[in-house]
Amino acid sequence: MSTPELTADVAIIGGGLMGCSAAFFLAQRGLSVILLETDKVGRQASGTNFGNVRRQGRPITQLPLANRASRIWRQANELLGSDVEYLQNGHIRVCFRDRPENVGKMEEYAVQAREEGLDLELLSGNMLRERFPWLGTDVLAGSHSAMDGHANPRLAAPAFARAAMKLGARVIEDTKIVHAAKIGEDFVLEAEDGRRFRAPTLLVTAGAWAGKIVSQFGETVKLTPRAPTMSVTEPVPYSILPAVGVMTPDEVETVYFRQVARGNIVLGGSTRAPSYPDEYRSYVMPQNTMTQFQHLRRLAPALAKLQVIRVWSGIEGYTDDALPVMGPSGTVPGLFYAFGFSGSGFQIGPGVGETMAELIATGHTDIPIGQYSIGRFG
Amino acid sequence: MSERVVIIGAGPAGVRAAEAVVRAGIRPVVIDEGSRSGGQIYRRQPEGFKRSYETLYGSEADRARAVHETFDALLPQIDYRPETLVWNVAEGRVWAARAGETEAIPYDRLIVCSGATDRLAPVPGWQLAGCYSLGGSQVALKAQACSIGGAVVFMGTGPLLYYVASQYVKAGANVVAVLDTSPFAGRVRALPKLAEQPDLLWQGVTLTFGLIRAGVTVLSGITPVEISGDPQSGISGVTVRTASGDVRQFDCDAVAMGWHLRPETQIADLARASFAFDPRTRQWLPEIDGDGRSSAPGLYLAGDGAKILGARSAEVTGELAALAALGDMGHAVDKDRRCYLMAQRARYVRFAEGLAEAFPWPHQFVADTADSTIVCRCEGVTAGTLRASVSEAFATETNRAKAFSRVGMGRCQGRYCGNASAEIVSALRGEAVERAGRLRGQAPVKPIPVGTARTDA
């Protein structure tokens, strides 16, 4: 007797925000879904990121996808039946005084973004400080996006998973797929403990772990596993509404922060550390915490007095061009990919899930994703 | 061969470790969170206070004096860093912060003597002002010569419960009652093991009789019902169910609570030591060999920060860990001395087993706490919310329950609610408590300001 197989219309490998939201939207379209997760849903990149629901700063060509995601975030609580702590309080992107060349880039970006339906308000440093008095004198100028915000990454992917389950999707945690192949018309997936799963369509949303699965289908993509540097302060009275980040070409300066309704201020950015997908471990390097603090003090000097109570990280997968792999496989019919979001996947996550569900269910989407084809690495 | 030794902690374990390292001709860095050596148990009074060793440390006065004098004599031969917090350990460097500045101190051998804090159980009302840990109430007395209140109830279990209550009585404070959740019969059963340290056993007996003689109500086998009061004026009383089932209420304005101790293991965790579940105390402890070697290269653990064996044992395990580190660096180690220390340690281990049996952690009481009880005081999260993270959001262990419910996410980072959370989560799932895992440690070990700047880069 062979082990009984579980079958569905669509199998998904990887229970991050992409996989969980795809499962939800596929189930909403009436397809049967099996979602397979090595660990627990939403625990790595999806659960440990900063929580920025930010469109501005994304490549202009990504804005249609980001706009789609934005609409989902706004109705997420009703859609999912649970609170993902989405706060639409705006997002500010600033440049420091020693990089005046960024002001022109910001203006140029705002013009292009407006054509894609994203309204940005450009403000001088003084105007910004008038409205947001906690910004430092090092801030030269900034761009305010009123319709962006932030949400709680710890809650988002599990909320999508639970909502998918309510619609009949089977979410199977603690299940590591070690072998994937297309046999006849179906994909056959085998877990470490020998359990098997079968579906005519396979979606790979396995983040930093996707490379090994993709290679079993004869495609290659290089993913570099990295670990974000995150911190959180003790709670203080709620007063900082928008999420704030720095526009700079220098990674060490890319710091950002946001305050959650409970009062804690989440700090992120500066140099990322390596991470270890095979061991399922990532570490915050103390020297990165220190550079993060250093540049946050430039951005908002008042933060200096606050106590940081915890740091954390997770495992993110980066492609060489920092753009995701998203769309159909170049070699195997019925196989789809959505991974390699390179530390910028949280906001677009639900949009990715809905777009992949649309693509799988109808064979088509109006969202431009051709630029994310795996073929570009061929 | 480089011989950079860093010792964290200057309690009895850290002092004896430093002494052994200096004896081998090495100048260690000794990092102390306190402003003066002694640790928590032999905490020194501030400059200018003039109480005698006998007043401060009672029967342990000679030991306290010896530890203090040993350390003072070592000062010219060590790099002592008082009032300094180790907030992270990574890549062979200890990150030490003091007064808003931090530096990374490299080490070849790291001896962690991080001590212990009270193990706390959630009791309805324990978030009210006037509720202290036993350790906190002892610090108030030892360092500041203050009582935590005008009428104090001591509740919990373990030798410290009786010890601190007696210190309060001796200092003239008004102690209303000592309420122990452990049944008296357990103490009788544990007698053979407790007899390993006859003077400590005798001390326990005399302390109890002394309390009764002083008119303090001493009850064993109680179940806490409630700490009453209101958010404005704080605690007004404590209600318990006695061993015979009666409900008794004690008027008071302060409660000191503790259920024995829990090791401070965050530094060992950050230094990537492996942990194992200890069924006797229902806690996760870093794995060490008899000398104090952890699973992480170059990392040694001693004193109550590794395993709760008490202050006397801390002197033994501190020296043992130093000898192990020295031996691993190629120094000749006195084998007879090591054998003697190992034999001493074995006796303290047996005594500690007796204590754990005599004063057990009341896990069923914790698991049964009402949904309305606050489990995580930092974040104000109730047992009901914690249980919902399991029953509605499918958390299977404490880290997941933390992510969904915020239990353990606050300022204390789960040090005072982690044990309770594991009991509640595992009981709801009908699993053994070790299946609920342990809250993984994250830096900073204690909060550090965003203003912290590096001095070495």
Image: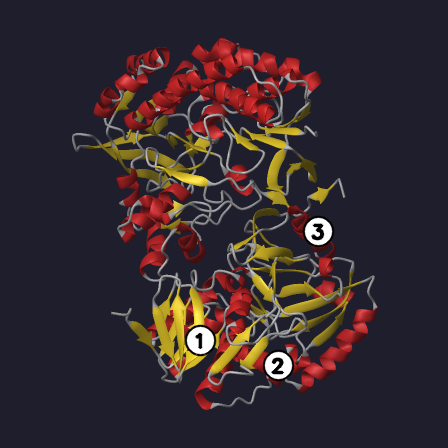
Mark 3 to mark 2 CA distance (whole Å): 37 Å
Q: Is residue B11 visible?
A: no
Residue occupying image coordinates x 28% and y 25%: B358
Where in the figure is residue B235, as x and y percent of width and height?
38, 36
Residue type beneath disc 1: Ala
Residue at the spot 60% in from the left edge and 75% down from the top edge? A147
In the image, residue A59 above or below residue A253 = below
Task: Give the class, few, some or many, for how many residues have Cα within 10 Å of label 3's Cα (few <14, many ≥20).
Answer: many
Q: Quadrant of the N terminus of chain B?
A: top right
Disc 1/disc 3 C-alpha distance (Å)? 45 Å
- The quarter of the picture where the C terminus of chain B appears is top right
Q: Quadrant of residue A242?
A: bottom right
Mark 2 chain? A
- Name the kind of residue labelled 3 in the image: Thr
Horizontally, is A53 left or right of A203 in the view?
Answer: right
- Looking at the image, residue A247 lies above or below residue B401: below
Secondary structure of residue under mark 3? helix
* Chosen colour scheme: secondary structure
In this picture, residue B334 sits left or right of residue B148: right
Q: Which residue is mark 1?
A: A181
Q: Give the distance between the C-alpha atoms of the residues marked 1 and 2, in whole angstroms.
A: 20 Å
Residue A327 in view of the camera? yes
Disc 3 marks which residue?
A: A291
Expressed as whole percent of the image width and height from the top left, the position of residue B382 reads 36, 50
Which sits earlier in the primary sequence, circle 1 or circle 3?
1
**Marks 3 and 2, the one that precedes in the sequence:** 3
**Residue A124 or residue A243, whichever sits in front:** A243
Please tell me whether mark 2 sits on a helix, a strand or a loop: helix
The residue wearing badge 2 is A375
Circle 3 marks a residue in which chain?
Answer: A
- Disc 2 residue type (three-letter): Gly
Q: For numbered disc 1, what is the local secondary structure? A: strand
